[in-house]
Image (spheres, helix red, strand yellow):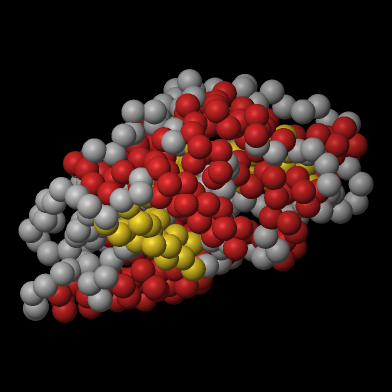
Amino acid sequence: MKSSTRSTRTWLRVGALLAAGTLALSACSGDSGAAPDDDPVETTDSGPVEIRFSWWGSDTRHETTQQVIDLFEEKNPDITVVPDFTDWGGYWDKLATTVAGGDTPDVITQEERYLADYAARGVIADLGELGVDTSKIDESVLESGTTEGGLYGVATGVNAYSIIADPAIFEQAGVEMPDDTTWTWDDFVEIANEISAKAPEGVYGVQEFGGNEAGFNIFARQHGQSLYGEDGGVGYDDELLAEWNQITMDLIEGGGQPDPARSIEIAEGGPEQSLLGTNTGAMGFWWSNQLPAISSAAGRDLQLLRVPGESEFDRTGMYFKPAMYYSISKTTEHPEAAAKFVNFLLNDPEAGALILADRGLPANTDVREAIQADLEPADQQSAEFLAGLETEIVDGPPVPPEGAADVPEITTRVNTELIFGRLSPADAASQFTSEVEAAIGG
């Protein structure tokens, strides 16, 4: 997981650079990376063209992506794809700078917290108008990239916020693994507290999880609410958030999770130093694509479980989250070539065989099925887990509004005040809502 504080600082710089670019470009003529008010020039690509593709990631991702580009160019000899990559820490500053300078990449890798802002500023195009084929992508996944009536990002791949459990610790504590199709939030608290009581000293039922807003989003959706509303404001009431906060306090009181100071220390260590990764916890809330890394750190097989409460209320709350998105510049000179490349990344089985689960499990369900046998065991379990959710997931949450990049830091900070007892569940809910509304202008 990336530092929330660093993400906030980065987004402040991104917003400033985009704003500066928009002002500068409105005062001059010529090519605009930050998109003027008029529609992009509609051209028909003919003859050799060159497009640029930006992404972030590790050296392994860069090497894999270059193989994918080579394959695309082999199949489309009239199109050259120029790679433009960096690590996560420098990606958003670099992208904002190039946009402000009128040199926007043709195909852009996006992240959900930034998508709405780039769309609102007119940087990225409506993919539906460019003919990108999304017929094999789940409708709820497409909704996650749709804002202001347009599809501004299409998921590279998907995962789900879930519980990862260690069956060995359940057995060690003499506690049965839960039936994740029926367990309730009360069951979850009871099981976590029981494991902490029966397991050896220093082994806990669950890792502290209130610092990630995805958990509350699922809880809210189970109750017919949502972290964000369709109108761009908050989509829940404070009473429900206070109820969610109380679950954490019940676990602290019952011993189901570590003491606050220990919880903060564990959270700073990342997945590999988590309770599950160090064989000192039975459960943790993680994204399903983190199963391989945590299993590797643990040195044993772990199991994905549905979040509690999925059968407890009138509807389910879990959803498919895009690992990242592909977007296309609104001012690209080669929209047909850019759309063809995005189609290839999403829908070509040979491309999928190279990418595998590097950008999340493929959003195209046919490609996901085709590559499943080639995945590592933990990724295979993730694929099977997601397939089992397909008939249960009702919809996707709204795209996070402008300003949502600040919310992870707010969540972590307010939750810290809660677990140390400096705020009550109700007061923590009120403060969180006030700060989130200020951040998103809601």
Q: Is residue 11 left or right of residue 215?
A: left
Find residue 160 and report its image quarter.
top right
Give coordinates of residue 69: x percent, y percent.
45, 52
Find residue 435 and report its image quarter.
bottom left
Instruction: Give the camera-side residue of 393 and 76.
Output: 76
Query: Does the rendering let one see residue 13?
Result: yes
Query: Does the rendering let one see residue 409?
Result: no
Q: Is residue 166 left or right of residue 23?
A: right
Give coordinates of residue 371: x percent, y percent.
58, 32
Residue that appears at 46% across and 65% down: 85
Is 24 above or below relative to 193? below
Residue that appears at 22% across and 72% down: 102
Give coordinates of residue 326: x percent, y percent.
37, 49
Residue that appears at 35% across and 37% down: 142
Instruction: Give the camera-side residue of 11 and 330.
Output: 330
Give coordinates of residue 101: x percent, y percent.
25, 76
User: Which image quarter is the C terminus in?
Assistant: bottom left
Q: Is residue 355 left or right of residue 149?
A: right
User: Which image quarter is the N terminus in?
Assistant: bottom right
| Figure label count | 0
Find residue 364 and report its image quarter.
top left
Instruction: Give the camera-side residue of 56 and 285.
Output: 56
Residue that appears at 34% across and 61% down: 52
Is 85 above or below relative to 13? above
Instruction: Give the camera-side residue of 133 and 126.
Output: 133
